[in-house]
Image (cartoon, rainbow, N blue to C red):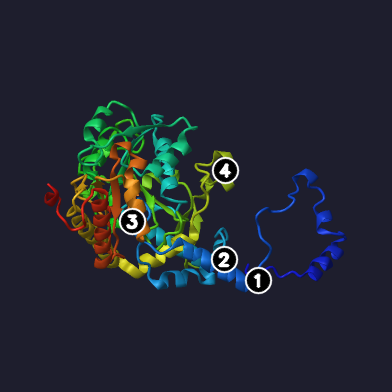
């Protein structure tokens, strides 16, 4: 609330009404040694005007930067209408929709969201969202292990998956007897090493995780990886950037027309799908942040999950269904709730029994406003800007491209100067130059993951190039704009 409405007289009147002499007496059951003597370092109260000035000053300390950092959270343009609608009271303060008769608006919105995500990923069913992309992947791993009839508790997790996602999955499964097997990447391409994967062919696993694009922005050979997983009795779990799916093949269409194993694992093949439809992945997850959710110091964002119909009873979280009432009128309700912890408690399929409702509302409105063509145009513009930025930076002495493979809107460069120094110098000029890959991949020390979205202008790209040229030239004892050969 914007202010505390109770005056000292109000408080005294309430205490008198309940027969308590003071606030301390009201809470006298709290042991004295647990009482806090006061909050050290907290100044005395300020007036509203003084607090406003203080907060403006604090906000100004953050500065205004041109960001070229991607690495899982992206700066996209969000139409003003999105959050203008989201913050209406009907959405902003809506409560958990357990009572369908009082929650038709919220339920319909979630149903529309599920429909959009199922369409975008090419799969049959979607839940109402999860906490973020990392926890969505962790839930997908648990889901695949539950679905494995052979009882295999092992999942192949490529090193090209986001490092934070891998850490969250490990934290989630480490006490559940589930083994995560790392799959190295090819040092030349930045893609999952198929030779390493083939060497694991004799290792029974419940699933293979397939990122697209991967953490380096590179486009993995998803058809090959999906077919390989199915041929070896594994489920295929896609980790996708939802915006990229406006351009790229939907995960539900990955793979060849060949038969693929049943979700139970064990290598038993099922018949090809009718109509020659590609096998596709079994589960798709990711972070919905690119769909109308602003950057916000790391969150909150939201995770999405879609899957094949055969796995719907293994899905965590909420699912909204469309039905008809006794009068034949359409309506919406939560469905398949028996698996949720508030019903089954310790026997629940998952302890996830909620969703990121407000952010999903933003994503649904965002996708509705943009439409398929709008999302495609944003993805094309982001890709074009990253290509343009990469070309500009590669024209500089001391910069080289690391992985020469197709990418979406992130790419990796190597500089001949310590990356922390380069990024610090760029930051001093108001530019967040990218992600230091050496922090997560020691073998990529000296490499920067760069990203440009549709928000960047030609002037932004050129400013980055000029500042990087100045920094590298100064570090290497040259004047900016003078070619290296002039110093030989």
Q: Are the residues tagged 1 and 4 within 8 Å (C-beta)?
A: no
Residues at marks 2 and 3, CA–CA distance in whole angstroms: 53 Å
Which numbered mark, 4 or 3, is in the foreground of this view? Answer: 3
- Binning the other alpha carbons within 10 Å of mark 4 as few (below 14), some (14 to 19) or many (20 upward) gives some
Quarter in which the N terminus is drawn: bottom right
Which numbered mark, 1 or 4, is in the foreground of this view? Answer: 1
Q: Please tell me whether mark 4 sits on a helix, a strand or a loop.
A: helix
Residues at marks 2 and 4, CA–CA distance in whole angstroms: 24 Å
Residues at marks 2 and 1, CA–CA distance in whole angstroms: 41 Å
Q: Please tell me whether mark 3 sits on a helix, a strand or a loop.
A: helix
Q: Disc 1 designates what residue?
A: 47
Is 488 located above or below residue 388 in the figure? above
Q: Are the residues tagged 2 and 1 within 8 Å (C-beta)?
A: no
Q: Disc 4 designates what residue?
A: 344
Which numbered mark, 3 or 1, is in the foreground of this view? Answer: 3
Q: Disc 2 designates what residue?
A: 102
Q: Is residue 173 left or right of residue 119?
A: right
- Sequence-wise, which precedes: disc 3 or disc 1? 1
Locate residue 119, reporting x and y percent.
32, 58
Front residue of this view, candidates 225 and 15: 15
Front residue of this view, candidates 388 and 481: 481
- Sequence-wise, which precedes: disc 2 or disc 3? 2
Locate residue 208, reporting x and y percent.
32, 37
Q: Is residue 127 left or right of residue 456?
A: right
- Binning the other alpha carbons within 10 Å of mark 3 as few (below 14), some (14 to 19) or many (20 upward) gives many
Q: Are the residues tagged 3 and 1 within 8 Å (C-beta)?
A: no
Q: Disc 3 designates what residue?
A: 426
Q: Is residue 184 left or right of residue 44?
A: left
- Binning the other alpha carbons within 10 Å of mark 1 as few (below 14), some (14 to 19) or many (20 upward) gives few
């Amino acid at each position: 609330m914007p202010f505390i409405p109770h005056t000292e007289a109000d408080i005294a009147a309430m205490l008198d009404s309940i027969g308590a002499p003071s606030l301390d007496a009201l809470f006298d059951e709290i042991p004295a040694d647990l009482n806090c003597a006061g909050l050290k370092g907290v100044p005395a109260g300020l007036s509203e005007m003084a607090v406003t000035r203080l907060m403006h000053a604090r906000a100004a300390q953050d500065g205004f930067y041109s960001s070229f950092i991607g690495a899982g959270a992206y700066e996209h343009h969000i139409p003003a209408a999105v959050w203008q609608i989201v913050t209406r009271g009907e959405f902003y303060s809506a409560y958990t929709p357990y009572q369908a008769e009082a929650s038709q608006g919220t339920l319909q919105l979630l149903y529309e969201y599920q429909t959009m995500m199922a369409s975008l990923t090419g799969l049959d069913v979607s839940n109402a969202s999860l906490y973020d992309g990392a926890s969505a992947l962790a839930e997908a791993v648990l889901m695949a292990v539950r679905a494995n009839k052979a009882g295999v508790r092992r999942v192949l997790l490529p090193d090209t998956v986001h490092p934070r996602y891998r850490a969250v999955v490990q934290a989630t499964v480490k006490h559940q007897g589930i083994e995560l097997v790392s799959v190295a990447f090819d040092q030349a391409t930045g893609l999952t090493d198929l030779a390493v994967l083939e060497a694991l062919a004799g290792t029974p696993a419940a699933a293979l995780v397939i990122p697209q694009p991967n953490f380096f922005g590179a486009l993995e050979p998803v058809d090959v990886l999906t077919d390989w997983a199915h041929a070896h009795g594994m489920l295929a779990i896609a980790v996708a950037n939802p915006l990229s799916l406006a351009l790229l093949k939907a995960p539900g269409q990955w793979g060849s027309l060949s038969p693929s194993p049943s979700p139970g694992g064990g290598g038993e093949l099922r018949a090809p799908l009718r109509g020659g439809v590609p096998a596709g992945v079994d589960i798709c997850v990711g972070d919905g942040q690119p769909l109308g959710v602003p950057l916000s110091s790391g969150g909150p964002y939201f995770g999405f999950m879609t899957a094949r119909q055969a796995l719907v009873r293994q899905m965590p979280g909420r699912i909204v269904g469309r039905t008809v009432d006794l009068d034949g009128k359409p309506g919406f309700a939560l469905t398949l709730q028996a698996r949720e912890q508030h019903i089954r408690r310790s026997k629940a399929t998952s302890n996830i029994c909620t969703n990121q409702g407000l952010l999903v509302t933003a994503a649904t409105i965002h996708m509705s406003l943009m439409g398929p063509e709008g999302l495609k145009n944003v993805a094309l513009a982001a890709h074009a800007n990253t290509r343009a930025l990469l070309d500009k930076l590669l024209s500089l002495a001391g910069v080289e491209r690391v992985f020469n493979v197709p990418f979406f809107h992130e790419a990796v460069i190597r500089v001949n100067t310590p990356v922390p120094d380069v990024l610090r110098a760029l930051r001093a000029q108001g530019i967040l130059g990218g992600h230091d890959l050496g922090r997560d991949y020691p073998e990529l020390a000296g490499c920067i993951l760069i990203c440009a979205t549709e928000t960047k202008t030609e002037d932004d790209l050129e400013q980055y190039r000029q500042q990087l040229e100045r920094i590298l030239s100064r570090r290497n004892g040259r004047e900016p704009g003078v070619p290296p050969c002039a110093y030989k």
